[in-house]
Image (cartoon, rainbow, N blue to C red):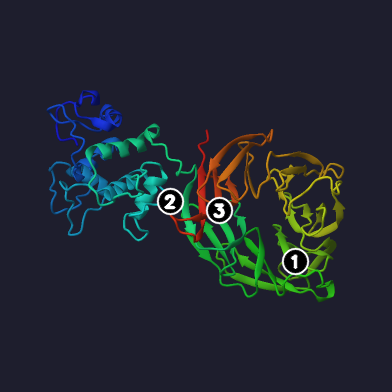
Amino acid sequence: MLLSLVPSASAATFKDAGTFSKEIDYLTDAGIIMGFPDGTFRPDLPIKRVDAVRMIMRELQEPLGDAPNPNFKDMSVGSKGYDEVAKAVELGIISGKPGNVFDPNGNLTRAEMATVLVRTYHLTGIYPKGFTDVSLNYWGSPYISALAANNITIGYKDGTFKPTLTISRAHFAAFMTRIIEPSFQPSNPEVADTYLEALFDMDIIDYKMHPTEPIIFVLDGATNDVSAINYETFDVVSSDELALPAERMAYANGKIYVTQHKKPHSPYWWDEDQEGAFTVVNASTLKIEKTIQIALDPYDIEADDKGVVYISSGSGQHTRVESYNSSTGAVLSSQRINDQNLIELNEAQTKLYSITTLVSPRDLSVYSITDGVLGPEKDSPYHGEYDLGKDLTLSPDGKYIFNSTGRFFRSAASVTSDMTYVGKLDRAYSSIAFDVNYGELYTANSQKFIQAYDYQTMEASGQFTTYGNVKKMFYDPNSNTLLAFTAVQLGKSTVPFTGLEVIYFDTEE
């Protein structure tokens, strides 16, 4: 490309533009490419490495002439493309070849094309379907995968990518145009609406989101520890292995609280025989600070900003929910509850809601909280009128209590209005997330799509496809992203991974 200093011709005048004439026309009109002096484009010729770099730098419109000398043995100051190559090295787009050469007149391969375009445009994502001729250990695999995840390439019909094949001038123009102008992208049902950003080999049994930092804390059942996943860098930091089997956790004010049980839950493990523990983990360092023994078989756990921990029992049928001072382990209060009730603290930390998981019909109830002390149980006004799943989720604005059947109830300060039925979504779900600021609600039901709703009307408003079956979702209002932990398989493998899939929303300021 850019082999001539004559004025750029319109692609429509290229007598040999061929299949990708519209893409060539687009780049020519943008001043990114030129044809040859004889009015041809020669689309089937291999693109030279230096010409690919010159195209990219013209599109980026970076100032030239101020970059450090990359000191390639085969490029001198003033040679064709030197300034563009020097700037590309400075920007981290290219790095040359072994022996400190750039090989400017060498032909660009498809793998090299993927690398330079992904680096230039900061493309991310993993394409789990993959290509049959690109192994995970291949040096170009992450770049080829990211290119496919962004729907820039779909490979060949036989499922290959042909990474070592020389790329033609026309194909490079087509790939570049698809990045600059998405309307040129091909139709590919294999590309999801999400970006699969990371894969983890974990058996996650519980999740908690940090309120201000890009961190999801997970309880890994395979290693019995707590891990912090940074969903911007995708780094993972883990605690030491917990001494006893863990089941659930809570986060509050820089601490993670983890239930520890000593025996399997049993309806015949009575109050006087119950025992267990909860562990306090520093959320910043993931260092285990203490483990407190309690006379309760812990099932679910919540915690408030004052260091009070609330734990429901997993055994004994008609059993206890208790509050504890997490510093001393002292019992602050105790109330009756059914065994294996799930609990959730409201945003104001003044009420603890619970739902039965073993009793039929299932029932909601609430306990008032004053200085860490639980008040008596208040039952829901309904007893069997509504079928309920084994879960409850409070909306971040404190208005509603959602259940996986799609039904939702009011969470109200008024005793007479609390837990009153409001309505029902159009389908059941297994995970739910809220974007209250922009009026959206998202649900998923262990399938490869996410359903969006208008939060005011609760009407369905659209769907997003995912690569894996959605297990858990979070919405981060700080970055306006929807995060989904999914069960993903790579290629034709039957081994599942935990995937972190992300939807990035554009919002007006």
Label 2 – label 3 distance at C-alpha: 18 Å
User: Of circles 1 and 2, which is in front?
Assistant: 2
Point out residue 313 in the picture as x, y percentages from the top left corner.
Answer: 77, 66
Q: Earlier in the sequence, mark 1 or mark 3?
A: 1
- Residue 325, disc: 1
Q: Position of residue 207 (x, y in %)?
A: 61, 57
Residue 129 numbered tag: 2
For badge 1, the amino acid type reads Asn
> Is disc 1 surrounded by few (<14), some (14 to 19) or many (20+) residues within 10 Å?
some
Q: Nearer the viewer, residue 303 or 258?
A: 258
For marks 2 and 3, the one nearer the N-term is 2
| SS under mark 2 | loop
Viewed as shown, does residue 333 lie left or right of 145? right
The CA distance from mark 1 to mark 3 is: 33 Å
Q: Amino acid at mark 2?
A: Lys
Mark 3 sits on what residue?
A: 485
Answer left or right for 247 relative to 362: left
Q: Nearer the viewer, residue 409 or 190?
A: 190
Task: Look at 18% across and 43% down and name the residue there.
Answer: 48
